[in-house]
Image (spheres, rainbow, N blue to C red):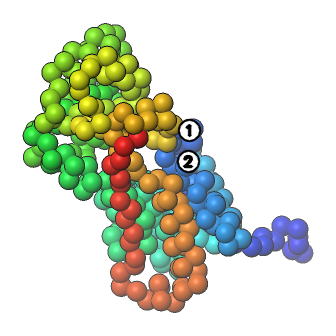
Amino acid sequence: PQDEGKIRSGMSFGLFLLGEYLTSHDDLLLAARNLAAGLGGWNADLALLPMSGKQGELEFVKRVVGRNMIDGLFITHMAEAEGIIKYMRGIGMPCVFFSYMDRDLPCAGKVPYVGIREREALNEFAGRFKSVRILASEGPSLARVCELLEKGNRIRIRRITRSGETEQIASELETIRDSELLIVGSLDILPVFDSQARLRKGHDFRQNTLVFRHYPIDLSDYKGRYLVFDRPVDQVGLEAAALMREMILNQDSFRNSCRLPEKRLDAVIRLI
């Protein structure tokens, strides 16, 4: 006999996460919070489904779907994203791909997509200057900024090391010019950068200094002193939830569509 207490009621949508992604500074976690908020607006729930790195992603998706745990799926940058998208389309279950960074989309046009337009905004702004100088510690933050910047920009990279951090930043600020865009490419050096910048009188850093906000962090201590590259990660989750609702309400039209909708949100450069 069927256990009535175990019959699932209401709608639930899955988001698969690798365990190492669940950190307090992760854009994915912020997007997930807003996914949950967006789904809650129409009485649906978000099920976070952590995975170990040893599990096959597509295999895990098939197991969850086979157990009737979800009514649809949100996916982001996963090694097997293309295979998962094809599988979900094959079984006719709603699937939305969302991205909290500017990356190529697997199966373009084959899955509804929400993402951020970072590359265009950053390069349009960098093009206003004769050259670009990046100050950052070595690591993924520096790599990300370099990945977004077009090679045509005259780029100089200064890798800041933990030992001698103050002296290195002070030396760079001595030679900065108004015609050069200065990018603070990693947030860990921002406090020392700020202390040294405030010692340099006569230079208006609001005009040519851009803080690249890689993850959600409070920058109110630097209000009015620098520009910030702001990525609307919070809106990505809300837009993805709205797109999923549209799919649920119009499943036939989505199923028969040759090209599914994409929405790219603009990154914004503004004064902190």
Return the disc, 2 or 1, that comes first in the chain's sequence.
1
Which amino acid does the dot numbered 1 rest on?
Answer: Thr
Q: Nearer the viewer, residue 47 or 91?
A: 47
Q: Is residue 238 left or right of residue 154?
A: right
Q: Secondary structure at mark 1?
A: loop
Which amino acid does the dot numbered 2 rest on?
Answer: Leu
Q: Position of residue 220 (x, y in %)?
A: 49, 35
Residue contact at pointers 2 and 1, CB within 8 angstroms: yes
Categorize mark 2 by other alpha carbons within 10 Å: few (<14), some (14-19), many (20+).
some
Q: Is residue 261 left or right of residue 43?
A: left
Q: Nearer the viewer, residue 177 or 244?
A: 177
Categorize mark 1 by other alpha carbons within 10 Å: few (<14), some (14-19), many (20+).
few
What is the number of the mark on residue 23?
1
Q: Nearer the viewer, residue 111 or 146?
A: 146
Quadrant for residue 13, please give it: bottom right
Q: Secondary structure at mark 2?
A: helix
Seen in the picture, residue 168 relative to 63 is either above or below; the reply is above
Quadrant for residue 195, please give it: top left
Q: Is residue 128 left or right of residue 47?
A: left
Residue 81 visible from this viewpoint: no
Q: Position of residue 222 (x, y in %)?
A: 43, 32
Taking the spot 54% from the left edge, 71% from the top edge, the residue there is 242
Seen in the picture, residue 222 relative to 86 is either above or below; the reply is above
Q: Is residue 63 left or right of residue 84?
A: right
- CA separation in Å, label 2 and label 1: 7 Å
Taking the spot 57% from the left edge, 38% from the top edge, the residue there is 24
What is the number of the mark on residue 29?
2
Taking the spot 34% from the left edge, 63% from the top edge, the residue there is 105
Residue 243 visible from this viewpoint: yes
Q: Position of residue 28 (x, y in %)?
A: 51, 49
